[in-house]
Image (cartoon, helix red, strand yellow):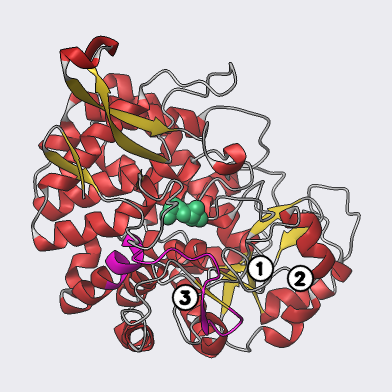
Amino acid sequence: MVYYCGTPVGTIAANDPTDGHPLNYDQVFIRDFIPSAIAFLLKGETDIVRNFLLHTLQLQSWEKTVDCYNPGQGLMPASFKVRTVPLEGDPANGTEEVLDPDFGEAAIGRVAPVDSGLWWIILLRAYGKSTGDYTLQERVDVQTGMKMILKLCLADGFDMFPTLLVTDGSCMIDRRMGIHGHPLEIQALFYSALRCAREMLISEDSALDLIRTLTSRLSALSFHIREYYWVDMGKLNEIYRYKTEEYSHEAVNKFNIYPDHLSPWLVDWIPNKGGYLVGNLQPAHMDFRFFSLGNLWAIVSSLATPEQAEGILDLIEARWVDFVGNMPMKICYPALQGEEWRIITGSDPKNTPWSYHNGGSWPTLLWQLTVACIKMGRPEMAERAIEVAEKRISRDRWPEYYDTRAARFVGKQARLYQTWSIAGYLVAKMLLDKPDAVKILTCEEDLALLEAMSCSLDANPRIKRKRKLKSTRIIV
Ligand code: GLC
């Protein structure tokens, strides 16, 4: 537990007594604290979550500098710690505690913590729903903080798509793994945060424009992801037979994906039943890797259609050994190997095949898996995964991650007593006991958003409604 001026404000990332070099694992990471926060909410110990939300809110408006450059207002730090400093620079005057955030200026690789602000909004809504105390989210400073995060995300750029354009390493995978562009994890958290913010923003005159922008972005984002990121047996067969170089508004192969780009491993691996959202989409490039957090959060937030959400769980069930193996759950599948590993990771020795971010297994993902399974009425799947974890996680001293294809070894450089491994397990167990509580995190299918999407497609004579029947069925 980390205290600031006598009150708890968060938990450190890992507390391994045998580790003399904790690097930055002695800090409160925003993303790592989320499962702890949910556990505290479920236990009714809500003050720490309130403190965390308010203190991180202050950090957001700090002046930040990375090598003379000032990143945008509204950016939330990846992590922070509490430092004790001499008053007015002189120890004779006594000491005071200060919060010391890291916005990426000290992080390995100087990565941008894009997910932090999105998680902050998601947690703010969970706090309100769980405590029934909506005064926190209604406070002027909290409303302003939320708007600052949203403005940063919704700012115009060179984007052609409603997805958020980010650099590599801007989320849980916080180092080079070839996920720059429009990675699924960020899109799922973005969608989720927009849905949560729409519920919480007070609709006064000054917020109306923002609410309008946010609502139309939600429609466009869900259309884009549902339509272009989804793959299953049928869609892969379509890609396999794609025509290319189509210049027109009517193009079927809009991103000019060449059939040869279809990953060979996928052809045998994709089950007849089930599918998933691909990791990323760019011109002539679909990253076919399966990223767990993005897919699970697409279920939780209803970014995926109900059918797609079922399909993702069907796929996890059908490929259980690949996803769960000896420890839930693989962060992405499959691992990058050989030349691909060398070029894409920059020869990263921590991200060798089936290790760490490159196909390693992270126990913390158990909680997101559990929320998704409960939401879809399939809690027994989460129970099975928890049973697998229980066989060794405590005996192994709560590692940060596991290595090898079937998650048989404790990760080569894994920290022990990793807080979110413990909290993830606890939240999974608590939610199975109180399945109704997942509602503090989930969003249901929003028919108004679907309708808005359908109307804007119909109003545009240049858009060919290839799948008209399918969309109509969803709306009905
Ligand atoms: C690693 C993880 C990151 C996490 C941090 C602290 O860098 O990739 O997601 O926040 O460790 O645990």
Q: Tell which circle, 3 or 2, labels the residue nearer the N-terminal end.
A: 3
Inspect the magenta stretch and tell me whether residue 192 lies in it.
no
Label 3, label 2: how far apart the Cα atoms are: 20 Å
- Mark 1, residue position: 289
Question: For residue 86, which quarter of the picture?
Answer: top left
Q: Residues within 10 Å of mark 2 (few under 14, many from 20)?
A: some
Image quadrant occupied by the C terminus: bottom left
Q: Where's residue 75, x and y in %?
A: 44, 31
Left or right: residue 44 versus residue 339 is left
Residue for badge 2: 337
Can you see residue 163? yes
Residue shown at 25%/44% (left/top)? 124
Instruction: Compare residues 229 and 316 and report the one nearer the observer.
Output: 316
- The amino acid beneath tag 2 is Gln
Q: Residue at x 57, y 40 (%)?
A: 111
Give the residues in magenta.
Answer: 404-425
- Mark 3 lies on residue: 329
Q: Position of residue 119 (x, y in %)?
A: 37, 47
Residue 162 in the figure: left or right of residue 134: right
31 lies above or below 361? above
Q: Which mark is residue 70?
A: none
Residue ranking furthest to the right: 245
Distance of label 1 from label 2 (alpha carbons): 13 Å
**Where on the picture, by quarter, is residue 141?**
top left
